Image (cartoon, grey):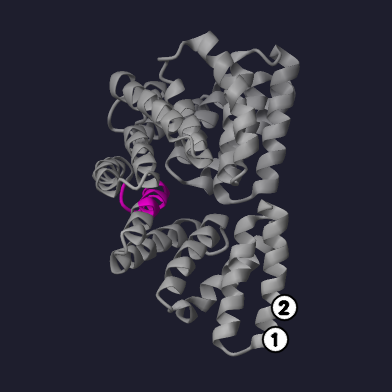
């Protein structure tokens, strides 16, 4: 099971962990540390397979058993906390994710110090969480010292560094440093090719990141070439209904929009929206953010009224997740104000535009 897991074969790994779990249960050894590690690893496989609820149940069970057996200040307990944090993170429960990441990091810091491998790997996971909630400034400040320490411990070409390089590539792309971004995406690609089996989606993510840089540099033909390679690989390794594939094709939709291929952009965005809704539901932050992307496209085509329900839903999602300081929340209000204007509700529209203006000033200056 561990061998399959390390190679990215999460279905085979999960099956082997399940079998091992059954054997240990029949031997009545469910209160052993070995059993706790098995259900934690099975949970990780389910997490990687986007089965978040099932993974969460296993992590809760592992936390309870580890606390009873060895206490709640062990390395294993901290690692399980970090895994549960990732479940909350993927499920859109950002408050809970931040709490669990913090608890995990505090335990690891107390046990091993801030220079340890375990602590810095968990710091990277926390930086990914910050990236996921679009807090790129703090993601950068968090991952840079961890990256330096991990290079000292593991070396630049260790397979673990592939995902760290992907994260740095995305952060530098966000900041507009495309040369630096490409440097890290290229490093990630090299590790995926040389150290990691090609039946996992990581290679596709590296090509996707390279395409993002070329798109930002307005080299649309090169961007499309790289996107096609990336999406073919991600589709082959994750499936065309996976969350990762749904998130990835958003880049292709944006490229179509920049090339003024609006029909293709419409179709691709709607495909992504359907995947995210089926996997995560309409109340997830990712669904709300994607709804804003589609609204932007629809406004350019003067068709925003047709998507009013998506905008209303996005506003509710941001408010329910206490994200009123989020730039995307004010984007949703902007689209609603535009809809009100189109409906000739000028007073309501003006009032909302003023709120949006103040919100933009508060969030982006």
Count of number-bearing discs: 2
Front residue (pair 226, 90): 226
**Considering depth in this image, is 343 or 190 the residue closer to the camera?**
343
> In the figure, residue 149 lies in which quadrant?
top right
Tell me the quarter of the image containing the N terminus. Answer: top left
Alpha carbons under labels 2 and 1: distance apart: 6 Å
Residue closest to the far bottom: 344
> Start and end of the magenta stretch?
239-251
Q: Residue at x 51, y 41 (%)?
A: 174
In the displayed structure, 260 sits above or below 153; it is below
* Labels 2 and 1 touching (C-beta < 8 A): yes
* Mark drawn on residue 347: 1
Q: Is residue 174 magenta?
A: no
Query: Residue placed at 52% from the left, 78% from the top?
Result: 308
Badge number at residue 351: 2
Q: Position of residue 284 (x, y in %)?
A: 56, 58
Q: Is residue 249 above or below residue 174?
A: below
Q: Nearer the viewer, residue 41 or 116?
A: 116
The answer to which image quadrant residue 79 occupies is top right
Q: Nearer the viewer, residue 234 or 334?
A: 334
Q: Which percent across, then down, holds residue 180? A: 45, 29
- Is 248 contained in the magenta span? yes
Q: Position of residue 192 (x, y in %)?
A: 33, 25
Dominant secondary-structure state across the stretch colored magenta: helix
Q: Secondary structure at mark 2?
A: helix
Left or right relative to 296: residue 13: left
Q: Looking at the image, which residue is at 71% across and 72% down? A: 354
């Amino acid at each position: 099971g561990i061998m399959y897991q390390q190679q990215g074969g999460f279905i085979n790994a999960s099956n082997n962990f399940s079998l091992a779990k059954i054997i240990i249960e029949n031997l009545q050894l469910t209160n052993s540390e070995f059993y706790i590690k098995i259900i934690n690893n099975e949970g990780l496989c389910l997490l990687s397979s986007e089965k978040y609820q099932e993974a969460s149940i296993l992590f809760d069970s592992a936390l309870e058993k580890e606390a009873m057996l060895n206490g709640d200040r062990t390395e294993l307990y901290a690692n399980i906390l970090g895994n549960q944090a990732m479940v909350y993170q993927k499920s859109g429960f950002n408050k809970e994710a931040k709490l669990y990441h913090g608890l995990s990091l505090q335990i690891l810091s107390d046990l091993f110090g801030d220079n340890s491998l375990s602590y810095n790997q968990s710091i990277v996971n926390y930086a990914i969480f910050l990236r996921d909630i679009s807090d790129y400034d703090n993601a950068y400040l968090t991952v840079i010292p961890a990256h330096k320490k991990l290079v000292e411990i593991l070396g630049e070409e260790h397979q673990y560094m592939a995902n760290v390089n992907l994260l740095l590539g995305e952060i530098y792309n966000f900041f507009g440093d495309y040369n630096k971004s490409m440097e890290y995406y290229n490093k990630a690609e090299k590790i995926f090719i040389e150290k990691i089996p090609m039946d996992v989606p990581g290679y596709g993510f590296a090509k996707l990141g390279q395409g993002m840089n070329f798109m930002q540099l307005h080299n649309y033909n090169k961007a499309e070439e790289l996107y096609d390679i990336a999406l073919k690989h991600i589709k082959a390794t994750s499936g065309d209904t996976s969350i990762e594939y749904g998130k990835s094709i958003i880049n292709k939709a944006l490229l179509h929009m920049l090339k003024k291929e609006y029909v293709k952009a419409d179709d691709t965005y709607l495909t992504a929206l359907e995947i995210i809704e089926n996997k995560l539901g309409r109340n997830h932050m990712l669904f709300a953010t994607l709804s804003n992307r589609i609204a932007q496209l629809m406004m350019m085509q003067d068709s925003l009224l047709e998507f009013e329900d998506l905008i209303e839903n996005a506003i509710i999602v941001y408010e329910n997740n206490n994200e009123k300081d989020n730039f995307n929340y004010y984007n949703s209000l902007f689209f609603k104000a535009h809809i009100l204007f189109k409906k000739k509700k000028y007073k309501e529209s003006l009032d909302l535009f003023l709120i949006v203006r103040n919100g933009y000033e508060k969030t982006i200056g």
